[in-house]
Image: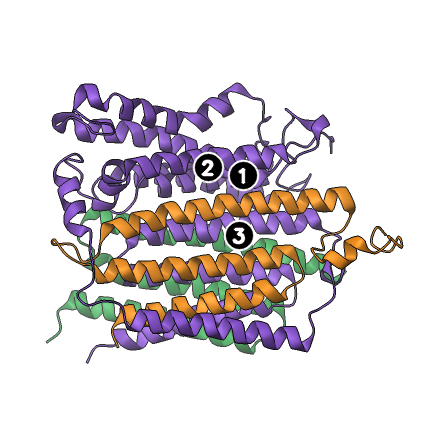
Amino acid sequence: MSPWVLAGLVGAALVGLGLYGLILHPHPLRKLLAFNLIGSGVFLVFGIVARRGAAAGFSFDPIPQAMVITGIVVAFAASALAVALILRLHAESGRVTLDPEAWTKPDDGAAKS
Amino acid sequence: MIPLVDLFSLCAIGAGVFFFFAGTVGLLRFPDSLTRLHALAKADNLGLGLVALGLLPRADSALAAFKLIVIWALVLLSGASTAQLIGRALRRGRK
Amino acid sequence: MSVLPFLDVALALLVVGLAVWTIAARDLFASVVGYVAYGLLLALVWVRLYAPDVALTEAAVGSGVTGVLLITAGKRLGAARAGEAGPSPGLALKLFAGALALLVAGALVAIILILPDPAPSLAPQAAAAADGPGAGLGNPITAVLISYRSFDTMLEKVVLILAVLGVWSVGADKAWGAAPAPLGRRNPYGATVFLAQMLAPVGAVIGVHIFWVGADAPGGAFQGGALLAAMWMIAMMARITEPPRVDARWLRLALVAGPAVFLIAGLAGPLMAGSFFAFPHAFAKPIILFIEAFMLLSIAVALPALVAGPPNGRSE
C-alpha cells in the first residue's frame, strides 16, 4: 500500500471521528474541536490529490497544496469567530448549552448559579 | 570497516534512542506525575541532545549543523519551562 | 526492505489514536492537549506527502495557535463545567451518529480508492507560473500563492480581516475601542516570563527567516507570520506586553497592510505587465517579496487579535 493511500484512509477516519464528536458532544468548544478534526481530514484527502498529481518535475501538485495552506488559515479564523460567539453566549446568559430545549424551558435559576 | 564518523553517529544516536526509550518506559511505569515529569525531561534533554550530536557530522553545511544545535537548545528551553510550570501546577493542586 | 512503511503505519495509527482521544477525553483541557499533539503528528504526515509547506502551516496554525485559542477559551469559560452544557446524548443518538460517521468515512474511503488514474494535475500550470509571472521563485508553492492564484490569496487575507472584525463586534457595546482581556494571569509565573524573554527574540528571528527563505525553500509569509504571532502571544501570556486597544490606528493599519499592498500591486498589473495581478518579468521576485513582507505583518497581527478576542471594557 503506497503512503498516499494510507494518508487517505487516515483522512477518511478523521472525518468520521470528527462527525461523530460534532453530533454527540454537548459542549460547544468540544464541538468546535471535532469540527476542526473534520477540517484536517478534508485537507488530508485534498493533500493526497496533490500528491497523486505529481507532474512537470514536481513530486506533488503545488496548487492543491497552496489551497490547503490558505484553507488551514481560514479554518483557524472561523474557529476564532466561533470561540468569540461561544464566549459571548456564556457572558450574556451564564450558560454554554446549544440545546434548544434548555432555552425554551423557564429559567429555574439553576443555570445561573 | 566502518568509518570513524559513522561509528560516532551510530553510538550517539543509539545512546539517544536509549534515553528516549528509557524516558518512555518511565512515563508509562512511574507511579506519580512528578517522577513521570523527571523521566520525560531526561528523554527530551539527553535523548534529543545525543541524536542531534550524532547527526552533526552528517549535516550538509555549517548552517544545517547550526540549525540542529538551535533546535536542541529551543527544545531544552521549552522543555525545562513547561516541566517547571507543570510541577508548579501539581504542587498547587496537592495542597 | 525499507523500514519506512512500518513507520508510516505507526504514524497513521498514532494520528488516529490521538484523534480518538480528542473526541473521547473527559474534560476540555485534556482534549485540547490531545488536539495539539495530534496537529504536530499530522504535520509529519504532511511531510510524508511531500508537503513541507503545509506541514509548517499545520504545525504553527492548525496545532499551535488553535491550541492557544481553545485553551484560552476554556480558561475564560472557567466555571462552566461540561455538565452545564446539556444532557449527554442517549443511546439511540449515539448509534445514529456512529452509523452516520461510518457511512461518511466509508464513502470517502471508496472515493479515495477509485480516484481517477492518471490523476488530474495542475502542476504544469504551476511550473509555468513559477517560470513566467513568478520568475525567480524556487518554491512553487509561493509562486502559486502570489502569482498563479494571487486573487485567492489576496481574498483570503480579506477573510482574516473580516474574521477579526467579527470577533471584535461580538464584544459588549460599551467596551468598543478598549483592549481585549489579557491573555495571561495577573502574576505570571517566573518560568513563563523566562520562557517569553528567552524564546520570543529567537522565535521572531526564525519567523523572519522562514518568511525570507520561503521564496526558494519551504516556508513563506503564512508560516513566518504564524511564528511571529506565536511569539507575540507568548509575550502577552507572560504579561510583558498587553493586547493592544482595538481602536489603535497602528493595529488597524497593520491589519489591512497585507491585502492593501497586494491589491495595489495587482491593480498596477495592467500598467506594468498587461493584466491584473501580473508582474513584470524582470522585477517579479522583488515585487513578490515586497507584497509578502506586508502579508507577513498582517498575519502576525491578525492571528493574535483573533486569539485575544473581543474588546473587554472591564478592568481586571
Q: Residues within 10 Å of mark 3 (few under 14, many from 20)?
A: many
Q: Is residue A74 left or right of residue C219?
A: right
Q: Are marks 1 and 3 in contact (CB under 8 Å)?
A: no
Which residue is tagged 2? C160
Q: Nearer the viewer, residue C28 or C124?
A: C124
Q: CA distance from mark 1 to mark 2?
A: 9 Å
Earlier residue among tags 1 and 2:
2
Q: Which mark is residue A23?
A: none
Q: Residues within 10 Å of mark 2 (few under 14, many from 20)?
A: many
Q: Which mark is residue C306?
A: 1
Q: Are marks 1 and 3 on the same chain?
A: yes
Give amino acid for label 2. Leu
Give amino acid for label 1. Leu
Who's the residue at 12% across and 69% down the image? B3
Q: Which chain is green?
A: B
Q: CA distance from mark 1 to mark 3?
A: 13 Å
Q: CA distance from mark 2 to mark 3?
A: 18 Å
Who's the residue at 16% across and 41% down the image? C130
> What color is chain A drawn in?
orange
Give amino acid for label 3. Gly
Q: Nearer the viewer, residue B17 or A9?
A: A9
Q: Is residue A75 left or right of residue A86?
A: left
Question: What percent of the width, then of the height, locates residue B47?
Answer: 39, 65
Question: What percent of the width, then of the height, locates residue C309?
Answer: 60, 38
Which residue is tagged 3? C67
Nearer to us of marks 2 and 3 is 2
Label 1: which secondary element = helix
Earlier residue among tags 2 and 3:
3
On the question of residue B15 being in view, the answer is no
